[in-house]
Amino acid sequence: MKHLITAKTESPLDIRWNALDATISIAFLAAVLVGIYFGSAKLLEILGDQEFLNTSTISNVSFSILYGIQVILMFGVVWFFAIFWRKARFKDLGLRYYSIAKTLWYSLILLIAIFAVSFLYVFIMSSLFGIEAPASKMETLIKNRSISNIILLIVVAFIGPIIEEIFFRGFIYSAFKKNWGTNAALFLSSLLFAIVHLDLFSLLPLMIIGWLLAYLFEKTKSLFPAIFLHAAYNLILILIMLGQLEMIKIY
């Protein structure tokens, strides 16, 4: 992996925000999102409409509203701490051009690595420990057809990768690296990335994916390769899930 990605020398990113800014933003997001979720759940319980937050019955409108709030909050804290408060530029978050050819090559290599690790992990958990992979939230949404496939594709393969890479790699990873160094930043940002997905079974492979995305960002000094890799991975997964559902319908 050390010699896999050798980036052309780029001007260094001007990271004006720090680990304290990142920590405050994480705590703020956690508090607000938890408050919104449980507050909404309580309100809907009183109103007798609990299907709004139910994964199996959630509508396109409900899903879009909830995800939209999350996106606005994540981008909002990045803008406040990095751009408004610390007077940085979006370019300093890693939003700078990078070679398209190299982006495609790195993504191909890392996609193979990610799927190989994921397959091996599922195999080990199943064969050695007898633990089968539970259905993910995305699988539940697809199987129940509660959300439009178009909306899922837009969110999972476009909006999600952009916002998550800006937040976790451009903002969080860069802040942790500034104060605590590269290795600590790689570990902590990937751990946080895995935790927020709220999938205990997939915690380890999600950490590995987060580590690879941060490593790619570290080596290229651009978010675009990480965004493309993230989007390609998500797109492949959701297409596989949609394909499996169609096969189930056929047979």
Image (spheres, rainbow, N blue to C red):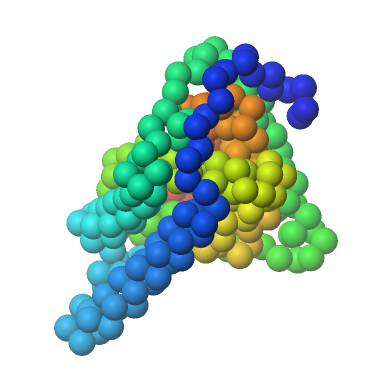
**Image height check: is 123 above or below 236?**
below
Q: Is residue 225 above or below residue 138?
A: above
> Where residue 26 sits in the image (x, y, percent)?
47, 60
Question: Looking at the image, which residue is at 56% across and 60% down?
Answer: 195
Name the spot of residue 223 as percent of width and height, x first.
49, 31
Whether 192 is drawn above or below 45: the answer is above
- In the rendered view, tell whether residue 11 sits above or below residue 116: above
- Name which residue lies at 55% across and 53% down: 19
Residue 84 horizontal side relative to residue 207, left or right: left
Between residues 244 and 108, which one lies in front from this camera angle? 108
> Residue 165: image x %, image y %?
47, 40
Is 50 left, or right, of 25 in this rendering? left
State the residue in front, 5 or 239.
Answer: 5
**Frontmost residue, 195 versus 175:** 175
Residue 208 visible at all:
no
Q: Is residue 121 left or right of residue 97?
A: right
Q: Residue at x 43, y 58 (%)?
A: 25
